[in-house]
């Protein structure tokens, strides 16, 4: 990508960058680096000149010069004429302080030793189950070796297993309605390529899954965010679930007429909410009335911590496109996902897929067929551990960070926290110094929203979660000592989940 970032735009993205917890040049460099890692500042763009940024921020040019020099040393800013270097990601072997990889969930960056990773919400493999599936796959591989090995739809045993899984859940499905992908992200990219053109609108929940927002933007589409309702106050009736604001969804669908709507109704990422069936039925009707293709991400559906009942959205309409994956329930390293849709749409997706790749690896698909056929096998133990982790994390947050407001998730892998002040990015910057890595709240939204929110996964063991929460408290205490932060904390509170 080429182009440049004007000083006013960068200043808006920086927000309350000068927390006073470190020298000003270091804090400026830290926040710019986080913005690059989070994708809020694209790669390959020229940063504002030292003089213009200093004038916009009301600081000395010397401070900006030192910040840019630090970014160059760490590999996040290319050497350019004068002060017009372009943003980049450090290559292996680039000298630096090692903090760049610890600031964000940016793919491909290693986490330094001793850092607890709270940027990703993923589990280790269900080892024995996965190993057995691959052992079985190797015995079945010889039968497929005479073929070419390319299959845009996916190997039949896996498509058949996925179809049977949907049929058992109340959504009659044939193998011809399944396309196997290399994970749910790959599936979404295929759907976007087939259904949404450049500049088309795509409705999303706000907050939403960061990589989905990235994919929508990368496709040249325009996200249309619809706010999620605020969580129930602490101590409220547990049955008072906030759900989704369906009136807002209906209004956005009818007024904006987006080409697609991307939603996560099953243990929504990052809030962990489960959409009630009545709202699912209403959402399907609204999408149909607007002529919008409803794309439902079900990657977290199996992580049902409290045994709550829900009907797959596709049961309410044959026009729904469903995305699934084994990444959250079994292991992200499997890189196996799928699309479930009507046969005509599946053919369109298969045609679009050939512009990206010609098919997935065969052995992994054969192994995945065994895992899908016995999908529930590893889940009871995994869910029991996750329930303990969730409840333990909530207790730790209440004990050590009582001014944080937490929403108890129905399922999934994380807790969505409302912070006492808009300090999410600042926390992410300070976090590596106290031994943790965070994904700042604005990663889950558009336009810099959710600076007062933080997603905290409960995928680590309980003893590590305790260490992580103590580190969060330490990071907050560092920021609270800053005069600038104290002024921020007395400002009017940000709107909840807006």
Image: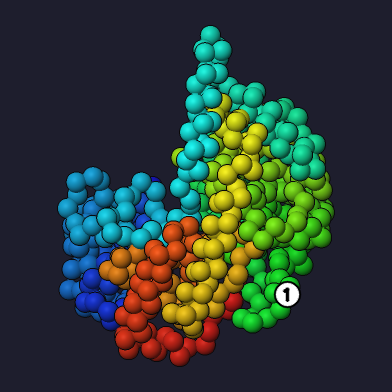
At a point 77% along the width and 37% down the height, the residue shown is: 167
- The quarter holding residue 283 reads bottom right
| Coordinates of residue 382 in the picture (x, y in percent) | 55, 51
Apparent side of residue 99 relative to residue 220 in the rendered image (left or right) = left
- The quarter holding residue 63 reads bottom left
Apparent side of residue 224 relative to residue 109 in the rendered image (left or right) = right
At a point 67% along the width and 49% down the height, the residue shown is: 296
Q: Residues within 10 Å of mark 1 (few under 14, many from 20)?
A: few
| Coordinates of residue 180 in the picture (x, y in percent) | 60, 32
At a point 53% along the width and 72% down the height, the residue shown is: 394
Q: Is residue 29 above or below residue 288?
A: below
At a point 22% along the width and 67% down the height, the residue shown is: 67
| Coordinates of residue 211 in the picture (x, y in percent) | 51, 51
For the question of whether residue 445 can be seen, the reply is: no
- Judge by depth and name the residue closer to the eye, 236 or 382: 382
- Judge by depth and name the residue closer to the eye, 216 or 55: 216
Q: How many marks?
A: 1
Q: Is residue 297 above or below residue 395?
A: above
Which residue is identified by label 1? Answer: 240
- Which quadrant is the C terminus positioned in? bottom right
| Coordinates of residue 116 in the picture (x, y in percent) | 36, 60
For the question of whether residue 391 can be seen, the reply is: yes
Classify mark 1: helix, strand or loop. loop
């Amino acid at each position: 990508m080429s182009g440049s970032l004007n000083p006013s735009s960068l200043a808006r993205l920086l927000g309350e960058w000068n927390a006073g917890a470190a020298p000003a040049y270091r804090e400026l460099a830290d926040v710019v680096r986080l913005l690059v890692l989070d994708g809020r500042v694209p790669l390959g763009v020229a940063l504002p000149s030292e003089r213009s940024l200093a004038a916009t921020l009301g600081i000395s040019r010397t401070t900006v010069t030192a910040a840019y020099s630090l970014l160059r040393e760490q590999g996040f800013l290319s050497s350019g004429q004068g002060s017009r270097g372009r943003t980049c990601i450090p290559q292996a072997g680039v000298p630096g302080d090692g903090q760049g990889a610890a600031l964000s969930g940016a793919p491909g960056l290693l986490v330094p030793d001793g850092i607890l990773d709270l940027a990703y919400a993923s589990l280790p493999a269900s080892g024995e189950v996965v190993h057995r599936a691959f052992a079985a796959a190797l015995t079945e591989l010889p039968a497929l070796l005479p073929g070419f090995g390319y299959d845009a739809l996916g190997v039949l045993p896996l498509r058949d297993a996925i179809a049977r899984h949907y049929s058992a859940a109340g959504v009659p499905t044939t193998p011809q309605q399944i396309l196997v992908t290399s994970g749910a992200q790959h599936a979404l990219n295929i759907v976007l390529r087939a259904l949404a053109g450049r500049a088309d609108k795509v409705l999303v929940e706000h907050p939403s899954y960061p990589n989905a927002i990235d994919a929508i933007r990368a496709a040249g589409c325009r996200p249309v965010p619809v706010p999620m309702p605020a969580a129930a106050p602490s101590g409220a009736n547990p049955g008072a679930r906030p759900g989704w604001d369906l009136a807002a969804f209906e209004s956005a669908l009818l007024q904006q007429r987006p080409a697609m709507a991307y939603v996560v109704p099953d243990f929504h990422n990052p809030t962990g909410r489960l959409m009630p069936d009545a709202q699912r039925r209403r959402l399907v009707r609204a999408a149909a009335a607007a002529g919008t293709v409803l794309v439902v991400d079900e990657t977290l559906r199996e992580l049902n911590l409290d045994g709550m009942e829900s009907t797959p959205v596709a049961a309410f309409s044959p026009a729904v496109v469903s995305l699934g994956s084994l990444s959250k329930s079994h292991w992200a390293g499997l890189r196996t996902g799928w699309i479930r849709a009507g046969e005509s749409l599946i053919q369109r997706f298969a045609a679009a897929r050939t512009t990206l790749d010609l098919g997935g690896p065969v052995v992994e698909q054969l192994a995945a067929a065994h895992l899908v056929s016995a999908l529930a096998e590893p889940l009871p133990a995994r869910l029991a551990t996750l329930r303990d982790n969730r409840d333990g994390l909530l207790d730790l947050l209440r004990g050590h960070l009582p001014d944080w407001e937490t929403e108890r998730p129905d399922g999934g892998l994380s807790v969505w926290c409302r912070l006492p002040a808009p300090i999410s990015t600042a926390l992410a910057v300070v976090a590596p110094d106290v031994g943790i890595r965070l994904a700042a709240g604005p990663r889950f939204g558009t336009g810099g929203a959710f600076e007062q929110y933080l997603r905290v996964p409960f995928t680590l063991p309980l003893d590590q979660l305790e260490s992580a929460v103590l580190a969060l408290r330490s990071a907050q205490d560092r920021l609270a000592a800053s005069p600038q932060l104290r002024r921020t904390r007395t400002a009017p509170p940000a709107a909840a989940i807006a």
